[in-house]
Amino acid sequence: MVTFFFYKNFTTAEMLSKISSNYQYSDGYVIVEDFHLDQDIVIINKDSKPNNKLLHGKIVQFPSSATDVVKKIQECAVGVKPKYIMESVWANKSTGGVQKAFIIY
């Protein structure tokens, strides 16, 4: 089981089903330093003090490996950035609680 936080392209059932038909999700957010979704920019500071903006999205669990999920995302060819960063973050569920998740930005 692997958990991802999606904030833009994979936040609908239609897009998530391109990764897998078997998933569970909840609404949530991560705390970031800054973001500009129209320009595909997300800034997450390793020092948590500058991180004070809420980036809302979906916390999604897949019954597969992170590698398999990334391969499916790549097959969708969403976006035109030459380089992406994948890291682990604490995702906050809107209903309460936190969960470790991968974010790609």
Image: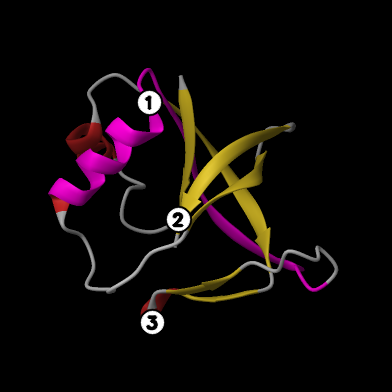
Q: Amino acid at mark 2?
A: Tyr
The image shows residue 54, relative to residue 88, as above or below, that is below
First of labels 1, 2 by sequence position = 2
Q: Tell me: 94 left or right of 5.
A: right
Q: Secondary structure at mark 1?
A: loop
Q: Quadrant of residue 77?
A: bottom left
Specify whether 100 is left or right of 102: right
Q: Rounded to the nearest whole Å, what is the CA distance between mark 3 and mark 2?
A: 13 Å
Callout in the foreground (1, 2):
1
Residue at the (23%, 67%) spot, across then down:
79
- Residue 72 visible within the image: yes
Q: CB under 8 Å between callouts 3 and 1?
A: no
- Residue identified by numbered label 2: 7
Q: Where is mark 1, residue-wise? A: 65
* Mark 3–mark 1 distance (CA, rounded to whole Å): 29 Å
User: Residue at image x 38%, y 59%?
Assistant: 8
Q: Residue at x 85, y 68 (%)?
A: 49
Q: Are marks 3 and 2 in contact (CB under 8 Å)?
A: no
Q: Amino acid at mark 3?
A: Gln
Q: Which residues are magenta?
A: 50-75
Q: Which residue does the numbered mark 3 point to in the structure image? A: 39
Q: Position of residue 72 (x, y in %)?
A: 21, 39
Asked if one can make out residue 15 in the rendered structure from this viewpoint, the answer is no
